[in-house]
Every structure is written in C-alpha cells, then in structure tokens.
Amino acid sequence: MSALTPREIVAELDKFVIGQEQAKRMVAVAMRNRWRRQNLAPELRDEIAPKNIIMMGPTGVGKTEIARRLARLSGAPFLKVEATKFTEVGYVGRDVESMVRDLMEIGINLVREEENARVRAAAEAAAESRLMDLLLPHSFGQEERGSTREKLLQQFRLGFLDEREVEMEVAEQGGKGIDIFAIPGMEQMGGQVRDMFSKAFPPKRSRRKLKLRAAFAILVQEESARLVDQEALTEKARERVEQSGIIFIDEIDKIASSSQNRTSDISREGVQRDLLPIVEGSVVNTKHGMVRTDHILFI
Ligand SMILES: Nc1ncnc2c1ncn2[C@@H]1O[C@H](COP(=O)(O)OP(=O)(O)O)[C@@H](O)[C@H]1O
Ligand SMILES: [Mg+2]
C-alpha cells in the first residue's frame, strides 16, 4: 500500500466500486498525502495539516463500500463506526472518545500479528525444544537422550505424534476473573481497573493433559509473547495509529440537528460537540497510553 500511487489505489478500488470517480480519487490522494508526510523530516512533518474527508451522497451509492475496500487495501489501523452509536459524555451509551480507544486496540492487534510473524521461526524452535523436554523422561542418559530427542522431533514434525498426549501447565482460559462494570461514559476507567486487577492477579495456571499439537500451539504462543518486547509493540502501534490510522464515521448525517425535532437535538449536539475536538486533533487517554488524533484520517 505504501508504495501505491493515487492512480494505482483508484485502480484497486475500481475492481469493487463502480463509478464514484471523485470519491475514489479523493480517498486515494488523502492516503498518498499521509504516506508522503510520513517520509518528510520531522520539522516539515508538523507543518502539514491533515485533511479529513466528508463523503456525501444518497443511500446505497457506495460510500461505505469505498471505506471498506480502502481499509483492506491500506493495511493501516482502520475502524468503521456508526455515528448513531454515540451519546454525549455522561449519558448511557458509548462516548465518542471510545472510537480512538478501539482504533488503538486494532493497531495493537495489527502490530502484534506482524511481530508474531517476525519471531515465528524462533518461537517454534523454542516451543519444539520445550515440547521435547516434556516428552522425554529425565532419567535418560545424556547421549541416549540426544538421539532419541532427535528422532522424536522428526516424528513430531512429520505429524506422527499428533495423537499423543503430554501433561503441562497452562494458563486457565477465561477463568472466573473479575468483572468490572463500566459506568456509562467511563468505560476507559473500567478498562484501566480491569488491567490493574489482571496484573495483581495473574491468570491461574493448572496442569492439563493435551494432545501434542494443541500443546505445541500454546507453547508457540508463550514463546512469541516472550520474544516480542511488549513495550516496543505498544509504542509501534501508537505511532501507527497516530500517523496512519483511519476512522470512518458512518451515518454522520444522523447526528446533525434538524429544525423540527428540538428535543433529540440536545443529545445530538452533545455528540457533535464531543466529536469536534477529536476530529480536529486532541489527546485521548487509552489503556495503552495517550493517543494524539491530529493526523488520524477521519472520513
Ligand atoms: N458504486 C458501487 N459499486 C459497487 N457496489 C456498490 C456501489 N454502490 C453501492 N454498491 C453496493 O450496494 C450496497 C450498499 O452500498 P453502501 O456502500 O453501503 O452504500 P452507502 O453509500 O449508503 O454507504 C453494498 O453492498 C455495495 O457493495
Ligand atoms: Mg453507508
């Protein structure tokens, strides 16, 4: 995606969206400009103000479709939300800032997948080694052990041992845990409290019998988590979200006020009021730290 020119982005969109040339060109240029900005020196980078996009048109002409296709293409953290889902802070429902927290969560998952892929070979090797430790009784002599281990490993790799079982310690799935009930408008606090608790009470581990394949998958996961620096991951994700994140706010006309219905206008105006600073650029507190919204692309 980073290397695509606007023309190439449009060509990609052309495969799925018929017509709507102007809309396709606008989003393509916006994507390209953000990419170019990221390649500038930091002093110059700050000089460039981002442009957000308002897409207008009747129902069913492809607005949402363009956004969806763009998301697939971009590889950037992308979130599509319904404007009608939000209520102003203090009312029951989701507060507007939660869109940034959700985008950060998406960014974290995206980067984690990349990082896991990067360390996969090393994680698998470490997992194989731990699996062999589990399989081989320690009473074996050194030499005997070495060659048996080699043979076992070969058999495992060929899938001959998949039905065998091992006993190992695993973190309990789900468990009882602690449910924190989010106070409306304060979901983010709920998240932070939950985080605090999960650090204070790490998941219980218990011994379980598992088929080799399943055991291997768990070990690979544990080894990946060990090999990936979680702090660096968060930092990378935050950078990605701030510099190339895209939030598509669908049905935004539904929170516009109309002159007929004054009563429901009050909460709509509240949502508008909460939305504006986020779109213009502010800092949102997420459980992964502060996220600046200045250069997030809002469509
Ligand atoms: N220009 C278009 N090219 C291809 N499919 C389209 C186009 N416009 C609408 N559609 C299809 O019609 C349906 C509704 O389109 P959607 O993008 O949700 O419309 P809206 O503009 O209301 O967001 C989707 O399934 C979408 O794939
Ligand atoms: Mg739509």
Image: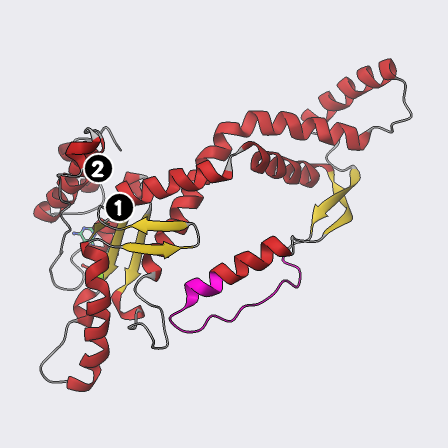
What segment is highlighted magenta in the picture?
Answer: 174-191
Taking 132 as reference, is 174 above or below it? below
Assess whether residue 15 is covered by the magenta stretch.
Answer: no
Q: Amino acid at mark 1?
A: Arg
N-terminal of the pair, mark 2 or mark 1, is: 2
Q: What amino acid type should be assigned to the residue bearing mark 2?
A: Glu
- Residue contact at pointers 2 and 1, CB within 8 angstroms: yes
The image shows residue 158 at horizontal and vertical percentages of: 68, 25
Q: Quadrant of the N terminus?
A: top left
Q: Residue at x 31, y 69 (%)?
A: 85
Dot 1 corresponds to which residue?
69
Secondary-structure class at tag 1? helix
How far apart marks 2 and 1 lie (CA) works out to: 9 Å
Q: Which residue is mark 2?
A: 12
Say which element carries label 2.
helix
Q: Tell me the chief SS of the magenta region.
A: loop
Q: Which color scheme did the rendering employ for the protein? A: secondary structure
Query: Residue visible at 16% across and 64% down?
Result: 59
Image coords of residue 253 (percent x, y): 16, 68
Q: Position of residue 230 (x, y in %)?
A: 50, 39
